[in-house]
Image (cartoon, rainbow, N blue to C red):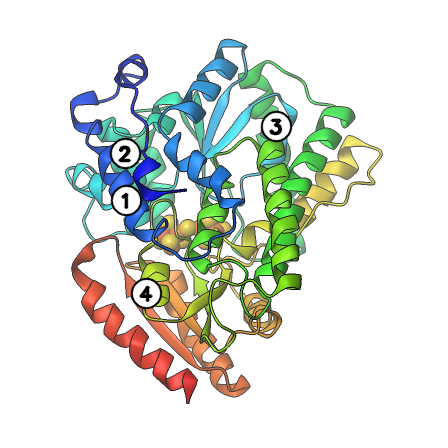
Amino acid sequence: MAAEQFTVKSDPELWTRLNMDVERFKNMPPMLTQAYTSIFLSQKNRPEGMSYFNDCVANIHTGRIDELMAAKDEGKPVVGTFCVYVPEELVVAAGGICVGLCGGAQGSIADAEKILPRNICPMVKSAFGFKVGGICPYFQAVDFVYGETTCDAKKKTWELLDAYVPTHVMEIPQRKGARDKVLWLEEVKDFKAAVEKITGNRTGLDEISGAIRLINDKRRALQRLNTLRHHNPAPISGLDMLLIEQIAFYDEPGRFAGKVNELCDELEKRIKSGSAVAPATTPRIMVSGTPMALPNWKLHNIIEKSGAIVVNEESCIGTRYYKDLIDESSTTVESQLERLTERYMQIDCSCFTPNDERMSQVVKEYRESGAQGIIDYCLQFCHTYNIEAVKLRQVCEKEGIPFLAIESDYSPEDVGQLQTRVEAFIEQIQG
Ligand code: BJ8
């Protein structure tokens, strides 16, 4: 797409209906247009299949919101979530739509800091600020939200968020022993019952089967794409991959999977013909750590503008979201819930202790992606990922993997300093 044709669309009438702060929010689409144009549309030789994802960004505050509102008019509830532990299959089975509400923008942090302490994770502050400032159409469109007890910042924020939007909380165990698995299954059953009560729709074997298939298909498409992007020379940039991983949290799942598979078909052809976004000699970096919620493109932009390419995201907006599928062969609801529970318990979030599975998973993904070094990304004040980086560094040293740990937030202030560190790391891995 030519840069001059791209515009993030506006619809003040829709935003007024959603009770947003329209005066303030109307500045957002031009800002996003400008950022997206300079970061994404300036890339060379992008796959044509990215045009669908350009459209997703162009319609992020309008077209997709219209779809959510139309679904609500048909009686389908829209449920907001903040963690990949909340089982979207059960929302879909009950006829609802699941959207991720994690915040990745600096613009809402000041709103949050009027209420929340400043020294907590920017992702939590950004999301909370979007709601209290009335500057996120997704937050305004949801009927209720489902939080979880993963980290302290989140679980205490849900108590405050409940004053603005009905907020339910799932208890996520912090260990993976036998009794934790029992607790988690009970939580999943309670979640199913709560969603059914709120939506008024009972979910049986067929509804759950259909939802498991639909979300598995989405995860399968992302797995396929991630395998293809590992090829050297890379057929797609890390920035574009990250964007697709972010859009996975708000787009319609069936359509999204179809478009990702179309893109994969194109990438297969590109690989055969040797068409790539960067030469085979380009330094290859894997990013691990905390999720990067839309529109957090800061680190990928720094890495790729510094002449390297990102070849894997070991993150919840990345492989932790799609590496595992749910077994589709269950013939009873009880068994479906058990299989679903098992799949979710494989997510290796740093909120768990011990979390050794993540260490081996990081090394596995590093080898599979053909990366030459790992940059571990930790959002400021995320204690669990920050402390886990110590262990990860030890593992990487033992495995001979070049490793750089960085901690950052959403402000532009540290970009220069990060760039210097990233460039030095790229030089190091180039030998
Ligand atoms: S399963 S990574 S999506 S909790 S970065 S808000 S942990 S202080 S996002 Fe996450 Fe679920 Fe875990 Fe994944 Fe807290 Fe850390 Fe902030 Fe975090």
Left or right of 18: which side holds 224? right
Determine the residue positioned at 35% across, 79% down: 425
State which mark lies toward you, 4 or 1: 4
Residue 122 x/y as whole percent: 28, 50
First of labels 3, 4 by sequence position = 3
Question: What residue would you read off at disc 2?
Answer: 130
Say what secondary structure mark 1 lies in.
Answer: loop
Say what secondary structure mark 4 lies in.
Answer: helix
**Residue found farthest to the bottom:** 431
Q: Quadrant of residue 262?
A: top right
Left or right of 123: which side holds 236? right
Determine the residue positioned at 47% across, 21% down: 68
**In the foreground, 94 or 171:** 94
Residue 359 x/y as whole percent: 55, 71
Q: Are marks 1 and 2 in contact (CB under 8 Å)?
A: yes
Mark 4 within 8 Å of ligand 1, using the beta carbon? no
Circle 4: is it few (<14), some (14-19), or many (20+) Cα within 10 Å?
some
Question: What residue would you read off at disc 3?
Answer: 92
Question: What residue would you read off at disc 4?
Answer: 305
First of labels 2, 4 by sequence position = 2
First of labels 3, 1 by sequence position = 3
* Residue type at numbered disc 2: Phe
Q: Quadrant of the C terminus?
A: bottom left
First of labels 4, 1 by sequence position = 1
Residue 261 x/y as whole percent: 64, 44
Q: Are marks 4 and 1 in contact (CB under 8 Å)?
A: no
Q: Is residue 336 above or below residue 69?
A: below
Question: What residue would you read off at disc 1?
Answer: 105
* Residue type at numbered disc 1: Ala
Say what secondary structure mark 3 lies in.
Answer: helix
State which mark lies toward you, 1 or 2: 1
Q: Quadrant of residue 93?
A: top right
